[in-house]
Image: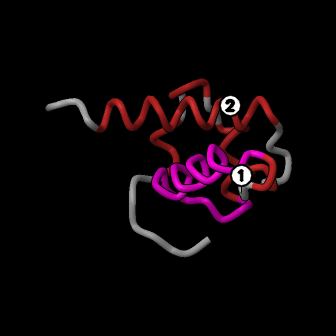
Amino acid sequence: MSDSIGAPLDVLKGVGGLTHHQLVPLRRHGVETVEQLADLVDGHRDNPGGSELSTVENFGVRRIELACQAIDQWRATAKEPK
């Protein structure tokens, strides 16, 4: 994962059911921002069997589903007019 500036991963706590326990494996994998996770989710949707998201240690099918849902909700909220 490359360093990148963006929304901290913590903004997803509670979004789509993500908790501290879902976020820890992502951080250990080097994911620190929502944008980085969004890139992994997009890659997973393009190639579920060979995605980087599917290689995150202790991040099984249910956690991948939660991450995808959280990113979808985050994107929908980010596009809403303020």
- Residue at figure coordinates x 83%, y 38% from the top left: 60
In percent of width and height, residue 36 lies at 53, 58
Q: Residue furthest left?
A: 82
Identify the amino acid type marked 2.
Glu
| Residue 23 position within the rendered picture, expressed as x and y whole percent measured from the top left | 66, 44
Residue found 68% across the figure and 52% down from its top? 26
- Give the residue pinned by disc 1: 53
* Distance between mark 2 and mark 1 Cα atoms: 11 Å
Residue found at x 73% / y 34%: 63
- The residue most toward the front is 46
Residue 32's place in the image compared with 42, above or below, is below
Which label is found at residue 77? none
Quadrant showing the C terminus: top left
Taking the image as shown, residue 82 lies to the left or right of residue 49, namely left
Kindly identify the amino acid type of the residue bearing the numbered disc 1: Leu
Q: Which residue is mark 2?
A: 65
Whole-percent x and y of residue 55? 81, 55
**The magenta segment:** 28-48
Instruction: Place residue 19 in its image quadrant.
Output: top right
Earlier in the chain: of badge 2 and badge 1, it is 1
